[in-house]
Amino acid sequence: MSRTGTGGTDRLVRGIGRVITVYERLSRLDRGRPPVTPVDRDLRLVVTAVREEADGVRGLTLSAPDGRVLPRWRPGAHLDLVLPSGRVRQYSLCGDRNRAREYRIAVRRIDRGGASGEIHQSLRAGDPLVVRGPRNAFPFVAAQRYLFVAGGIGITPILPMVRAAAAAGADWRLVYCGRSRSSLPFLGELAGSDTGRVWVRTDDDYGIPASGAELLEHAPDGATVYCCGPIPMITGLRLDLPASRARSLHFERFSAPPISGGRTFEVELARTGRVLTVPADRSALDVVRTAKPDVAYSCRQGFCGTCRTRVLDGEPDHRDHTLTQEQRADGMLLCVSRADGGRLVLDL
Ligand code: FES
């Protein structure tokens, strides 16, 4: 899954952490647990359970081999999974934060999805797995009212937010969209929620949502909206937010953000001399992958740093918010950064 930042400003943001902190205080299990920090070291875990959560969606529970308490996390956090093939992919934590000795993620199988196919085909209970994190690029801010909007597997970061909102006594609603009920993971867990707060909106029953307004209709007055879903869903919410009762939108995408204002440029792979043309509407990463399928990447949104590549010549148009000036001096993130015409020579 890929992700991006937030829109809008919530004046209650000044209370960031207040509700979360209260929630944490309520959780006696948090005592003595390691703090929430960016964790880039490898955690060597074991797959302790594999469950079919919906059509094409597999849930994995991960624990330490010795059963020790794992670093804690907050709603919106994700893990980097380092798969046996060496692929690194990110998956939102979707379990119960109070279960201190385990993490849970869920993976939808994507057609020709290398990492998701590997997880569905190869991973079994008992297999070792290296993860990094938890890290959080989709932070959950304190508010009194929320609208959560999830599209299919987008429920994964949303589920812990719903739990936190409910635990904090906030007024919340969830609109959960997907093709059909059988495609939606964790419906059983939501069945225990106050049913008046959850609307399961399937294309089977209602057709594809016509607009963001249709989803925003369910927002309590002044709600903070959290959405994880496909780009059209997020775009609809962004367009219709100003005319709605909601006040701010935080979202996370499944896929790379659209490219705006791109120009065609070339990349030269220095070790072979091969020159590739990057069209205005494609990323350098996409194009480089056609020639070099094993090039490392993960988030495809410019925040994980996995696709950082040395630039031997040329002037990149840096479009990330991740690299330091020092790192930009000789490198770029292939997934989002480009060139304003001309050619970049890459150490590939
Ligand atoms: S793949 Fe994550 S920064 Fe490029």
Image (spheres, rainbow, N blue to C red):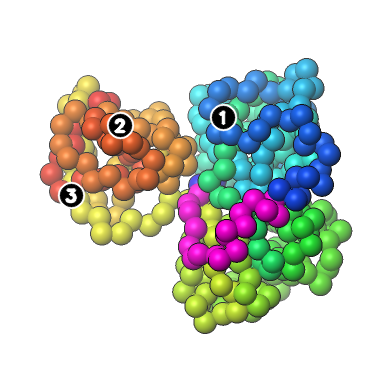
Q: In which quarter of the image is the C terminus?
A: top left
- In the rendered structure, which amino acid carries the disc numbered 1? Val
Question: Quarter for ligand 1?
Answer: top left
Residue visible at 46% across and 74% down?
239
User: In this rendering, is residue 41 above or below 180?
Assistant: above
Which percent across, then down, holds residue 336?
34, 46
- In the rendered structure, which amino acid carries the disc numbered 3? Asp
Q: How crowded is mark 3: few (under 14 residues within 10 Å), some or many (20 or more)?
A: some
Asked whether residue 56 is in view, the answer is no
The quadrant holding residue 178 is bottom right
Tag 1 residue? 39
Which percent across, then down, holds residue 142?
65, 58
Tag 2 residue? 327
- In the rendered structure, which amino acid carries the disc numbered 2? Gln
Residue closer to the observer: 257 or 250: 250
**Which stretch did the figure color magenta?**
3-20
